[in-house]
Amino acid sequence: MATTRGYPATGYTVENVHAGSVAVVDKDGRLLAWAGDPQYQTFTRSALKPFQALPFLLSSGPEKFGLAEEELALLCASHSGEEKHLAGVHSILDKIGMRVEHLECGCAVPLYYDFVNLPAPIDRQWTAAHHNCSGKHSGFLGWCRLHGAPTANYVDPDHPLQRAIRAALADAVDLPESRMPMGIDGCSAPNYALPLAKLAHLYARLAQGPSDARLGQALGPLFDAMTHRPDMVSGTERTDLVWMTAGGGDWVAKVGADAVQAFGIRSAGIGIAIKIADGNSRGMHTVTYNVLDQLGLLDDAKRTVLERFRRPEIRNARGTLAGDMRPLFTLQRA
């Protein structure tokens, strides 16, 4: 992916080039298409959230605590801290008998303000509920309550919850835990690096939902929640909301920090994982659009809805057109 700059009348010059990789696999994990290195190992960041919820789902936690579908979507969310997100987090915590003070994700200014280009209020007191990962962490606490595990230090890698997540993930991707390097995510929970094709396979299986032979009990409800309530998974002006809305219930999408994007396409039986090597997210959406287009997944209606991502313009503070972003790759096919 490249960014250009120049005068429209005289043409543009390439200013920046962002390298990356793409993996497209089927529901059995077979590599179908790629760009760059489809086995590139990257931290999965927030794209891992649906699969960090696996132990809770496989223990029937949402049913036992009576979680609604929008609350299930929040377990997978990088939400924007809007009122509906905060209400959902508080509802989950009430149902599991916990409080905001028990969340170990830290406090953060809601993402909402950045995405709608508004200054954050300076007179607000932010809490852990405003953190974009507070839904995931509420699910973490739910697992602890369900299993009688300590609710303190649940982000510690040696906590029973994190051991359960690590074991479930290793089983899902058919890798030993030793081949899943561990790091600390922005919300303090452990996160894992996987080959890009493995992340794509996870999303191909998520898209199949209940028909997945091994994890359908969990993946079915997660797919339904994410695709029925994409507004709870992300938020106003957020790309995952746009992608999933455009997909009309067929696409499940989840972004991760530092330019990670994962997709599952139910009708095509495929999963897609994208990583921009330098972590520059502004180019990731252009790449994502063009991957979907090259795979034949965009009809005229979807192109119209997603046009903003095809070749985004770069404008300066006065609104003057200064350049654009362009894809520079063609998917290779197996």
Image (spheres, rainbow, N blue to C red):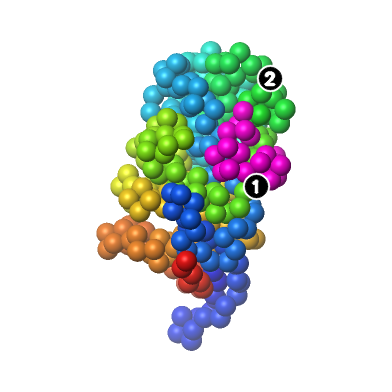
For label 2, count other residues whose C-alpha is less than 10 Å away and answer few (under 14), some (14-19) or many (20+): few
Alpha carbon distance from label 1 to label 2 = 25 Å
In x, y percent, where is residue 202?
A: 50, 45
Relative to 27, does residue 314 appear above or below in the rendering?
below
Q: Quadrant of the N terminus?
A: bottom right
Residue 95 x, y percent position in the rendering: 47, 15
Which residue was labeled with disc 1?
193
Image side of residue 107 versus residue 90, left or right: right
Q: Secondary structure at mark 2?
A: loop
Q: Is residue 231 visible?
A: no
Residue where numbered disc 2 is placed: 152
Name which residue lies at 44% across and 44% down.
Answer: 205
Dot 1 and dot 2 residues touching (CB under 8 Å): no
Residue at image coords 60%, 71%: 17
- Residue type marked 2: Ala
- The amino acid marked with disc number 1 is Ala
**Observer-nearest of 298 and 107:** 298
**Residue 183, magenta (yes or no):** yes
Q: Residue, x 35% and y 64% (percent of image)?
A: 296
Q: Residues within 10 Å of mark 1 (few under 14, many from 20)?
A: some
Q: Which residues are magenta?
A: 164-186
Q: Quadrant of residue 132?
A: top right
Question: Residue at 52% of width from left, 25% of height from top?
Answer: 56
Between disc 1 and disc 2, the foreground one is: 1
